[in-house]
Amino acid sequence: MSLTFIRRPPGLQFGGVAVRQLADRAGSTPFFAYDRSAIDARIQEVRNLLPCGISLHYSIKANPMPAVVHYLAARVDGFDVASAQEMALALDAGANPAAIGFAGPGKSHDDLRRAVACGVNVHVESETQLRLVTALGWELGVQPSVAIRVNPDFQVGHSGMRMGGGAAPFGVDVDQVPALLHELQAREVALAGFHIFWGSQCLHAATVIEAQRHSVELVLRLASGLTKPPRFVNLGGGFGIPYFPGETPLDIKAVCEAMHDWLPQLYERLPGITPILELGRYLVGEAGIYVCRVIDHKISRGKTFVITDGGLHHHLAASGNFGQILRRNFPVVIGNRPDGATRKRCHVVGCLCTPLDRLADDIELPEVHIGDFVVVKQSGAYGRSASPLHFLSHPEPVEILV
Ligand SMILES: *Cc1c(COP(=O)(O)O)cnc(C)c1O
């Protein structure tokens, strides 16, 4: 008797590996896979377009998988962290503490103590934080590195998630910044930098350009009374990626070209300053997929439901964020048969007992069989770590970096 190996068509390739093989490597479905070559290519693209002298930071909350953070540590100039755990991840990956910015409206005493002890830049977002940090500097016998996160007084349109221009728990209102600068001076702590975060997930180049211009103007205004220029200004990021049908990629070339309009003035007025761009999803979002398996299908009142072993507990964003927004489909394909000929309309759902657990509504897919792989693209950011993993107590998804 001889063994016959059946050569199956490879189907969708991701990071040079067939989805079927990724599943074997992950050991089980569902899983997230991230493609290091795609992350690298994206960083090269950004670096080639950015005017020299601008620092590129990665915002860890977009994807905190330790292997991803480690991979990025050798490729970006610094990290932005929003918790002590994210700070530890960045430090474990070998990041220079002076190139880590710690922002967040609710940093605890212990978080701040760790940040000061590690020499990380603390982006203070209130007078309380400022006082605590300077007091901790005395207690620990180290000069704390303090930046001020500013709640900008401008608002820009077209941004997916708008911030700034109104009341916010993030940062310090522009009109309160002078009092904080005064307080820093009284405590003999030099200001390390300003941090201005104006929004997220923006696909409109003109909006990003406008926000950056406003941010630079704001920083020049705020820094005008300082005796010594700050070391850095974090201008936020906001670069979006297309998730839904009809969305077009951000024209990053136009964004980077427009930086030349304000850079000379920034360098002239604040000699030695380093502008920082903090990007999260733009660096990793398109370099990730979420893969689950079809475990059943059925017809209800004429509609076909494809039921998977995945769902909103792993990928809240693809499901539509608990129904809070008008739901649109992330790009979904059948990994082992992406180009199957007989296409049919169906609804792809997860395994949770809630009507909100949907991965694709009324989508046209090749005829789906039990055991097929459902692949959700654009899943490299705000996937696993931004999902309610324990909701309904199913197993957690594996993550692999290929
Ligand atoms: C979340 C966050 C980012 C990253 O946002 P993306 O949309 O993933 O690029 C950057 N800066 C701050 C302050 C953030 O809170």
Image: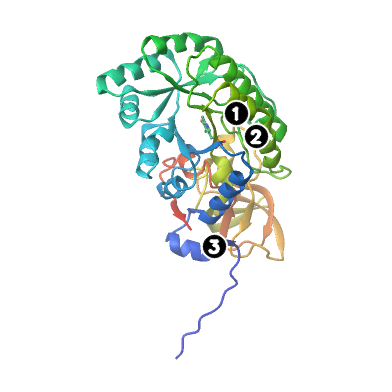
Q: Amino acid at mark 2?
A: Cys
The 10 Å Cα crowd at callout 3, few under 14, some 14 to 19, many 20 or more, is: many
For this view, does 141 lie left or right of residue 345? left
Q: Earlier in the sequence, mark 2 or mark 3?
A: 3
Residue 206, percent from left and from top: 72, 32
For this view, does 25 lie left or right of residue 345? left
Residue at position x 46%, y 37% in the image: 79
Give the residue number, with chain letter if any, for mark 2: 202
39 above or below 147?
A: below
Q: Name the outermost residue toward the bottom.
A: 1
Residue 235, numbered label: none
Quadrant including the N terminus: bottom left
Q: Amino acid at mark 1?
A: Gly
**Can residue 137 be seen from the camera position used here?**
yes
336 above or below 78?
A: below
Q: Are circles 1 and 2 on residues that touch, CB within 8 Å?
A: yes
Give the residue number, with chain letter if any, for mark 1: 199
Q: CA distance from mark 3 to mark 1?
A: 34 Å
Q: Name the outermost residue toward the right.
A: 246
Give the residue number, with chain letter if any, for mark 3: 19
**Mark 3 element type:** helix
Q: Earlier in the sequence, mark 3 or mark 1?
A: 3
Q: Amino acid at mark 3?
A: Val
For this view, does 155 lie left or right of residue 54? right
Q: Are circles 3 and 1 on residues that touch, CB within 8 Å?
A: no
Residue at position x 52%, y 47% in the image: 311
